[in-house]
Amino acid sequence: MIKKCLFPAAGYGTRFLPVTKAMPKEMLPILTKPLIQYGVEEAMEAGCSIMSIITGRGKRAITDHFDISYELEHQIKGSSKENLLEEIRQIIKKCTFTYTRQNEMKGLGDAIYQGNALVGDSDPFAVVLADDLCVNPKGDGILKQMVELYNKYKCCIVAIMEVPKDEVYKYGVIEGNILENDVFMVSNMVEKPEIDKAPSNLAVIGRYILTPDIFKMIEDTKPGKNGEIQITDALCEQAKKSMVIAYKFKGKRFDCGSVDGFVEATNYFYNLEK
Ligand code: UTP
């Protein structure tokens, strides 16, 4: 069983400046709910109950969001607004939140490495990048689909989607052989390749299942693209030494780390609620 989910949330979110100057990107709302709450709900649906968040300077709002606000509770008690807090109350009741800080923003690989202190060395864990908002209106959430696949293959899994060839430079891109419908055995991974050097148009998005041996792989990973420790590079080594699966998930992903994707997600959820 995968009980722990890691949320790297220490990045600067520079594409959303100036709003991210004093506010975490993960707290940007899609309608009335912050991005990270959507991620936590997806992790709960997949069976996780320990949410481990990698924070950094200026991210206090995340910690406060997943805690009781007694003053507010007192203020709205008995009013019609009380039910607006119901969902978050349930999350706080059912989950345990743990935190650590990434002191220097040395990349996603390093952020995940800092999470070792929270998730330990004995069990596999999930990773959710909250700025990738994923939905599957027709069935199980993306992380739940991945946990089921983990139960079969017992190795690291990355979620992938097909992207237009001219957008591969924004992603980690995989090369692999089909194992079964929508499931690939990874043979190579490249972070943000040039368009004509990309091994495919299968791009990694912000959902992973990792086994704890990944921490040793990250330790041995040198800074890569943009001078950052890339999880793609660590996973590529893992794929060569043992096995990594890439899974073409069922559902839809919004890139809420970009303004376009954020607006698209907002419209999607607004139309759903109308
Ligand atoms: P991004 O590169 O999308 O996030 O990292 P960013 O750096 O915050 O955004 P921009 O590009 O400046 O606008 C993907 C995820 O990895 C986390 C981010 O918080 C985000 O969830 N991350 C990235 C870290 O936690 N630490 C890092 O050093 C880098």
Image: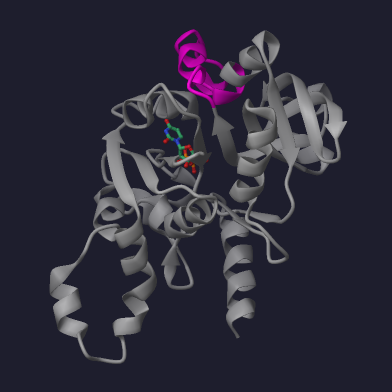
- Which residue is at the front of the view, 182 or 23? 182
Label tally: 0
Is residue 171 visible in the rendered structure shown here?
no
Instruction: Give the left or right position of residue 76, taking residue 143 as reference.
Output: left
Is residue 219 visible in the rendered structure shown here?
yes
- Which residue is at the front of the view, 196 or 59? 59
Tell me, yes or no, whether the highlighted magenta stretch contains residue 194. no
Q: Position of residue 175 (x, y in %)?
A: 79, 24
Instruction: Give the left or right position of residue 237, taking residue 127 as reference.
Output: right
Q: Quadrant of residue 171?
A: top right
Q: Quadrant of residue 204?
A: top right
Q: Is residue 128 above or below residue 40?
A: above
Q: Is residue 37 above or below residue 107?
A: below
Q: How is the image coloured?
A: one colour
Instruction: Give the left or right position of residue 248, taking residue 177 as reference.
Output: left
Q: Position of residue 151 (x, y in %)?
A: 64, 36
Which range is magenta? Answer: 211-233
Q: Is residue 22 above or below residue 84?
A: above
Which residue is located at x 35 percent, y 66 percent?
A: 90
Which residue is located at x 77 percent, y 24 percent?
A: 185
Q: Position of residue 128 (x, y in %)?
A: 51, 43
Which residue is located at x 28 percent, y 34 percent?
A: 100
Q: Is residue 63 above or below residue 99?
A: below
Q: Quadrant of residue 7?
A: top left
Q: Position of residue 152 (x, y in %)?
A: 69, 33
